[in-house]
Amino acid sequence: MRSNTRVGDASTTVLVIDDDVKLCRLLRDYLEPLGYAVETAHDGRQGLERALGGGFAAVILDVMLPVINGLDVLRELRQRSQVPVLMLTALGDEPDRITGLELGADDYLPKTFSPRELLARLRAVIRRSLVTAQQEREARAAPVSVGPLWMDPEARTATLEDRPIALTPVEYDLLLALARAAGRVKSREQLLLEVADRDFEAFDRSIDVHVSSLRRKLCDDPRHPRFIETVRGLGYKMRRPGLTE
């Protein structure tokens, strides 16, 4: 068997996690002439460790794996990485596809795939990942203003009427998420996804506590809000200045 020595860069290096050695070899033989470097792992634990090491454009992940099954690998991987994952399995039942997608898989392909279909889907998940990463970098760097509130995400500073506001890291991220979506309601679940970075247990309903703290620092009256409005049964909304909403 060929060595797993990496010959490509991170934008063209793919990790295949599958205990079918022959299939791994076939994928490597098909993808390498197209410019991809292919690394392989043959059990879930080894694959998870390799994936978490980073440096991959995408992971092709089988569901039925020894030691740790593919869905558990995906669950653990998604807690620490957003690398694109293409699920590859002999199980074609809809519940398995749904479970994989709900856990964060980017696409799902049965093992009856054709090589051309695999290549098309692989290119698609990598392309989406690159575009999303670029958009997120640009969005994170762009300053945000809502009336007299000004936030510079790159410097992680906030001012209100040109006076700096002292915010905790969570308060800053929460206020930034609301400011970027000014005029639109954000549910608590959406805010948790954006602010808690998947560590939901640490935040839970304390989103409300953080909002209360933000209101104090913004001198915002919750009964007549200038900035953060509670939308009953839905979540919170940053009010746009000069508009009756």
Image (spheres, rainbow, N blue to C red):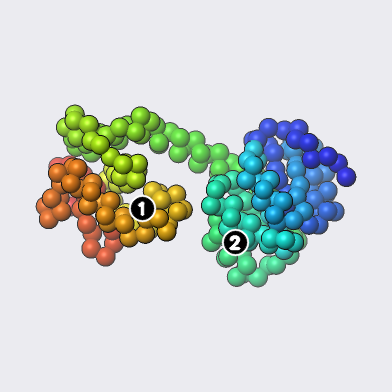
**Residue at image x 55%, y 52%?**
78
In the rendered structure, are the residues bearing label 2 and label 1 in contact, judged by CB atoms less than 8 Å apart? no
Task: Note whether residue 66 is visible.
Answer: yes
Q: Is residue 117 left or right of residue 204?
A: right
Which amino acid does the dot numbered 1 rest on?
Leu
Q: Position of residue 75 (x, y in %)?
A: 58, 58
Picture quadrant where residue 236 is located: bottom left
Give the camera-side residue of 154 and 237.
154
**Residue at image x 62%, y 60%?**
72
Circle 2 SS class: helix
Q: Which mark, residue 100?
A: 2
Q: Position of residue 134 (x, y in %)?
A: 49, 35
Give the camera-side residue of 190 and 76.
76
Q: Is residue 236 left or right of residue 245?
A: right
Q: Position of residue 209 (x, y in %)?
A: 26, 55
Mark 2–mark 1 Cα distance, whole angstroms, equals: 23 Å
Of pointers 2 and 1, the one earlier in the residue sequence: 2
Task: Note whether residue 244 is visible.
Answer: no
**Residue at image x 63%, y 61%?**
71
Q: Position of residue 148 (x, y in %)?
A: 18, 35
Mark 1: few/some/many CA within 10 Å (<14, 14-19, 20+): some
**Residue at image x 51%, y 39%?**
133
Which amino acid does the dot numbered 2 rest on?
Gly
Q: Which mark, residue 191?
A: 1
Picture quadrant where residue 44 is located: bottom right
Mark 2: few/some/many CA within 10 Å (<14, 14-19, 20+): many
Q: Is residue 165 left or right of residue 139?
A: left
Circle 1 SS class: helix
Q: Is residue 70 above or below residue 54?
A: below
Please identify, in this view, whether the residue under mark 2 or under mark 1 is nearer the observer: 1
